[in-house]
Image (cartoon, helix red, strand yellow):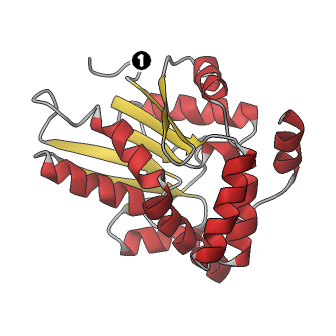
Amino acid sequence: MPRVQAWARRRGELLDDPAADPATVMASLADVARSNRLLGGRRAALAALQAFLRGGEAPVSLVLLDVGTGLGDIPLAAAAAARAAGVSLRLLGVERHPAAARAARRNGLATAVAEAAALPFRTGSVDLTLCSQLLHHCSAAEGVRLVSELDRVARRGAVVADLRRSVVAAAGFYLAALALRFQPVTRRDGVISVLRGFTAGELANLCRNAGVEAKVRRHLGFRLTAAWRPRGGRR
């Protein structure tokens, strides 16, 4: 498996390139949103966020920053789930692709074009931070900086949702992507993404290297989440 992961990390993905063709980026992000809904990405992220939303301790209004928001499908689903729990979520996004940022804005997220490892927000300026399926695009050093940034800007809670590395999952994604008629670039990139993913121990260690002790959980669909209370956050 280490050789497979090393092979995958040498392969570039469309969403690694901020100068990629906007139309192709949008088509691929639409596939990613469908994959999130059908293959477990959205469910895993929402399950991890629930720990910071449920019960009487949650404020009635919170700000959620989604880093690498794509089309904004996961934070929009989070806002709907929060409403059911009596909590209002104000949504913010960060994207490195200008076309994706424009699409997220059209969907109702105030979205900045910026790098995830250098967030343009003050320390402790939002309640919750979320980063879904972005961490596996990063090198080890970049990943540590990203987790540190998620921790820095959040007051109440931080969540990373990503992929659990598996050859079986990669093959399963490819077959599902064929059946769902995803774009060829999405099929290719999706397989590479799964093979760039993490084990639970690797994700926990990455968070530890960033100075945070995260609770790492496995979810259906070969998904992982890491959730923690920020070091300077509310308890």
Horizontal relation, residue 125 to residue 115: left or right: left
When the figure is inspected, residue 89 is found, relative to residue 148, above or below; the finding is below
Q: In this view, does 154 lie above or below 103?
A: above
Which quadrant holds residue 208? Answer: top right
Q: Residue at 59% across / 36% down in the picture?
A: 146
Q: Which amino acid does label 1 sit on?
A: Arg
| Residue 196 makes an appearance in the image | no
Q: In x, y percent, where is residue 8?
A: 83, 49
Give the quadrant of the N terminus: top right
Q: Residue 20 in the image: state x and y as whole percent.
A: 72, 72
Task: Answer with left or right where residue 201 lies relative to residue 157.
Answer: right
Residues 96 and 32: in front is 32
> Split into 4 quadrants, where in the image is the C terminus?
top left
Disc 1 packing (10 Å; few <14; some 14–19; many ≥20)? some
User: Is residue 27 positioned above or below 125 on the image?
Assistant: below
Q: Nearer the viewer, residue 156 or 6?
A: 6
SS at circle 1 = loop
Q: Residue at x 37, y 23 (%)?
A: 229
Kindly identify the residue that appears in the image at 39 percent across and 50 percent down: 43
| Residue 192 x, y percent position in the rendering | 76, 55
Q: Is residue 81 left or right of residue 126?
A: left
Q: Circle 1 sits on which residue?
A: 231
Count of all numbered marks drawn on residues in the image: 1
Q: Indicate the quadrant where residue 22 lies.
A: bottom right
In the image, residue 205 lies at what x, y percent? 64, 20
**Is there any visible trace of residue 55 in the rendered image?**
yes
Relative to 163, residue 180 above or below: below
